[in-house]
Image: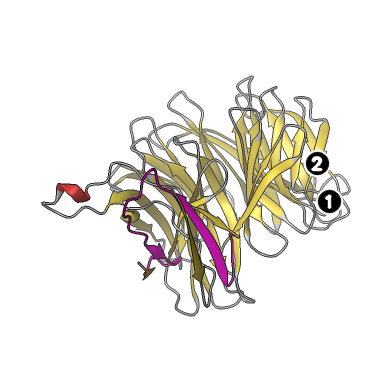
Amino acid sequence: MKRKVTLLILGMLFLLPSILYGDIDTLWTKYFDSDMGTDKGYSVLEAENGDYIFCGVYGLTDLIVGRVDSAGDSIWTNIYSYPMEGSVQGRDIIDIGDGNYVIAGFHIVNLKWDMMLAKINGEGNAIWTRFYDFGADESAYGVCQTRDGGYLIAGRTSSFDAIAFDVFLVKTDSIGEVQGTYLYKSDGGWDAAYGVDTTADGGYIVACQSDSASLLRFDSQGNLLWKYGSGAMAYYAVKTLANSDFIALGISSDDFMKVSLVNDNGYAYNSRNYGLSGDYYYTTGYGLDITSDGGYILTGVVSDYIFNDRVYIVKIDGYLNSLWSRIYGTDADWKYSGAYSIKETSDGDYIAVGYNDADIWLLKLGEVQDVVSGDSTNIPNNYLTLTSYPNPFNTTTEIKYYLPTNQNITLEIYDLLGRKIQT
């Protein structure tokens, strides 16, 4: 049986959570505060035993790496103050598979920027640290491990006659020694690479912001194969899929969180925008992960231009349809929260890291079921995925769902703050 529901929505954009009888809940949150300035967490991952490790900047000057257990209790927190003045920031951390981890970031001293790559063990002790100076200013925002056991660092440079900054990649061996550099020049002024992953054939896919592209595909020798996008949009994260295609996340030309599926020839065959509508809102996607159900989990920041930032998280299926979305943080003026990284955990939940005002903010989220105690007839054993069009929508949307027989269901609709608005 096919049914159709037409809704009239007033006010802000609502993205419909499409799991019936299900909800998402905050399992725990943890804060790390230096009392010295703006602390931010930029990357998080799950360790081999179910712990979580994150990196970021502490007190505006120091690299911080922390490890917490599955309940969020701190195991260790290391602050790396290198023997030089200035600021050291960790922007990306990856698990290299031997109980050790590699961190990419940058060092700033006397207004001079240098790329940084560091290897640490599971106790947070530094094994080696490398700084890279190519003449002018360089910074790193992402890193991936290459097939030969080395690393590819993604960032930006003002060296090599760049116009302000150009997209810059540095290939190193397993101990961080430079093997090669790759440059993508455009006519823009503030270009940078933010996310990077290896491709099925040993090349590289790069999420970037530049005057002429937002996704770059290189072969294993650093030769550009194709580019996608334009300066009107940007991607900040990218991952290679099992079918050799790519998923990229960033911001669209009209200020929505943008997610795209792109094939290996550089053709975007599916794209969706998410976020709040209105003249004063923009939503940026920074972190993504591929989930075990074949979908994706996305996170970023929803802002109102002047007064407020909040964490934005959306779960989508393999076709980029929204399943649910949540906003975390206060909507009070001059309060700022955001998330830069999110991962699905081995227990099927999600771990995200970002900031809440001046503190590093670690959030553990999990799906819960609405079950009435003592009434077994209300225990769900499946769920329905609804299709709505158009989505995102402004004033109206049409939601279609299918039932195998003529039976009763309960349809509940929530707004982006998790408030039930209609049953």
Question: Where is 129 relative to 316, above or below?
Answer: above
Query: What's the residue type where badge 1 is placed?
Result: Ser
Front position in the image: 401 or 344: 401
Density class for disc 2 (Cα within 10 Å; few <14, some 14-19, many ≥20) is some
Whether residue 24 sits left or right of residue 10 in the image: it is: left
Q: CA distance from mark 1 to mark 2?
A: 8 Å
Is 393 covered by the magenta stretch? yes
Residue extending furthest toward the bottom: 333
Residue 166, horizontal then vertical, whole percent: 80, 49
Q: Quadrant of residue 347?
A: top left
How far across and down, in percent of the image, does residue 19 sit? 39, 51
Residue at 46% of width from left, 65% of height from top? Answer: 416
For the residues bearing labels 1 and 2, Cβ distance under 8 angstroms: yes
Tell me the residue that label 2 is attached to: 227
| Quarter of the image where one finds residue 245 | top right
Could you tell me if residue 58 is visible in this image? no
Please check the rendered image and state whether residue 183 is part of the magenta-colored stretch, yes or no: no
Secondary structure, magenta segment, majority class: loop
Residue at the image point whose x is 50% and y is 58% from the top: 399
Residue 51 visible, this orientation: yes
- Look at mark 1 in the image and give the residue it sits on: 212
Helix, strand or loop for disc 1: loop
Residue 275 position, x and y percent, is 56, 63
The residue located at (69%, 23%) in the rendering is: 202
Q: Nearer the viewer, residue 280 or 70?
A: 280
Q: Quadrant of residue 153?
A: top right
- Left or right: residue 14 versus residue 27 is right
Query: Which residue type does callout 2 highlight?
Result: Lys
Span shown in magenta = 391-420
Residue under the point 60% across and 32% down: 241
Q: Residues within 10 Å of mark 1 (few under 14, many from 20)?
A: some
